Amino acid sequence: MTEKFPKNFLWGGATAANQIEGAWDVDGKGVSVQDLLTGGTLEKPRHFTAKVEEGAYYPSHTASDFYHHYKEDIKLLADMGYKVYRLSINWTRIFPNGDDEKPNQAGIDFYHKVFQECHKYGIEPLVTISHYEVPYHLTEAYGGFLNRKVIDFFENYCRVLFESYKDEVHLWLTFNEINTALMFGGGYIQAGVPVKDGDSIFAPVSHDKVQNAYQAVHNQLVASAKAVQLAHEINPENKVGCMIAGSEVYPLTADPKDVLMAQQQMEMNNFYCGDVHVRGAYPAFAKKYWREHDIKSDMDPSDAETLKNGTVDFYSFSYYSSGAVTIHPEKQEKVNGNMSSGTKNPYLKYSDWGWSMDPEGLRIYLNQVYQRYQLPLMIVENGLGAYDKVEKDGSINDDYRIDYLRGHVVAMKEAIDDGVDLIGYTPWGCIDLASASTGQMSKRYGFIYVNRHDDQTGDYARTPKKSFYWYKKVIESNGEDLD
C-alpha cells in the first residue's frame, strides 16, 4: 500500500436532526413524519400513529437533546479534531407545515448558531437537506412526494436554505438514502408517502406500495436536480452531492444465475438512483424493470431536461454491510437483521443487529462506483451498532467498534491506492442517538455516549468512549496511526 489519505481529506462524523435534536415541538417547529413513529426494537418494528398517543414513546421527541446541547456537543467534536460535521436541517423547523408562505425565523436562527459554532472550531458543515424529515402536513394534505406540488415546496425550502446560509455552508446533500424508499417498499420515512394508522414501517409490500415508491422517488430525483441547479445559481462555490444507501451484493455460489441475480440487485439497489443523480437519465435496466413490474410513473415532459441539467458534484453514500443472494434454497442460511434480511454469507461475522461486517466489501464498492461514475466519492455513514457497557469507573471500552472502524479505514486506504478519488469519511452517530429504524437509544454507533438519565431536567451526560480517543488519533495522523 503506497497511497496515503489526501492532506485535505475530510475526517468527521454524521448525525440526523430527527435522531439527535429532540425539542420536537419547540420554537415553532412543526410535526415531521418521524414525530409520529413510536419506538421499537430489533424484534418489534416501529409503527405510525395518526396522532401522538399518550404514554407511547416517540424517539424523535427527546432524542439526544442536541437542540439544547449543541455547543457542548460541537466542542466534543472539535476535541476529536473534526474537519467536517455532517448534519441535517429539520424541514419542519424552517417550514412547520412544508407549504407555509413564510419560513419560521426561530428555526433559521437556530441553524445559524449551529453553523457559527462549527466554524468557531474550523469544522466545515456538510448539510443534508432532507434526512427522513418530511413535514407530516405534506403527507396528510398532498400525499408526500407522490404529489408533484411537493417538488415546488421542496424547491422553495432549498431556496431559503441556500440564501440564508450562503456564507456558512458550501457542502450540501439533497435526499438522504434516496433509494431506501425502493428497497423497503412504501416510502413513508424517506418520502412522506402515506401509510395507515398502526402500520409498522416495514409493513408488507403490495404492488400499489411499490408503484407509489417509484413515483415518489422520481419526484424526489426531479426535486434534487432542481436543488442542484438552484444551489449553483445562488452561490457558484456550492458543491451538492447525492446520498445513496450503499451495499455490496455477492453471489453465494459460482452459478452464473447467482452472479446475474447479484448484478441485478446491485443495479436496482445502488445504481438506479445513482445513475440519475450522476448521469442525468434513467439507465436501461430501470426501464426494463418498469415494464416487467408494471410500474407507471407520472413524468412531466420537462423532467428529462431537468434531470440532465441537475447532476451532482460528488457522490456520497452510507456503507454498513454487504449482502449475498442465491437461487439455491438448499444452500441458503437465512439471516434476519435490522432493516435487512436474506442469505447469510458464511465468510463474514454479523453484528448484534444482524448486519454483516465486511470492510473488504467497502473497498469493492468504492472501486465499482468510482469506475462507473468517475466522480469524487465520500463515505458519509459507516459504523457498528453494539451494546456498550459503562464500567464502574465510568469508562466505555468499545474495542469491537475500533476493530470494525479500523478495518474500514484500511479498506479506504486500499481503495485510494486503487485509484479511487475519495474525499471524506464521516462515521455515523458521532454522538450516540436514537436509531431511525428501531428508535432505540441503546443501538450505539457513536464515539460519545449519551446517558439520558434525567428526562425531567434535561440533564444528559456525555461520556467519551475508548473509540473517541482512537478516532482522534486517526484524524491527527491523517489515517496513518491505526493502532
Image (tube, rainbow, N blue to C red):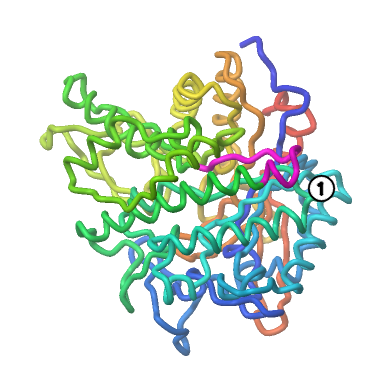
Can see residue 357?
Answer: no
**Quadrant position of the N terminus in the picture:** top right
Observer able to see residue 234: yes
Question: Looking at the picture, does residue 250 appear above or below residue 273?
Answer: above
Identify which residue is drawn at 23% across, 39% down. Answer: 289
Q: Identify the residue at horizontal 76%, vertical 48% (top origin).
A: 169
Q: Which residues are magenta?
A: 231-243
| Magenta stretch encompasses residue 232 | yes
Residue most toward the bottom?
A: 54
Q: Is residue 121 left or right of residue 363?
A: right
Relative to 5, say whether 217 is above or below: below
Which quarter of the figure has residue 208? bottom left
> Circle 1: is it few (<14), some (14-19), or many (20+) Cα within 10 Å?
many
User: Residue at the spot x=47%, y=48% of the render?
Assistant: 222
Is residue 96 depicted above or below 477 in this figure?
below
Question: Which residue, as the protein is rendered here, is positioned at the far top?
Answer: 2
**x%, y% of residue 288?**
23, 35
Residue 376 sits in quarter: top right
Residue that protrudes farthest toward the front in the picture: 301
Horizontally, residue 221 falls left or right of residue 480, namely left
Q: Which residue is mark 1?
A: 78
Question: What residue type is disc 1 on?
Answer: Ala
Nearest the camera: 443 or 424? 424
**Residue projecting furthest to the right:** 120
Q: Secondary structure at mark 1?
A: helix
Q: Residue at x 59, y 41 (%)?
A: 380
Residue 239 drawn at (x, y percent): 68, 38
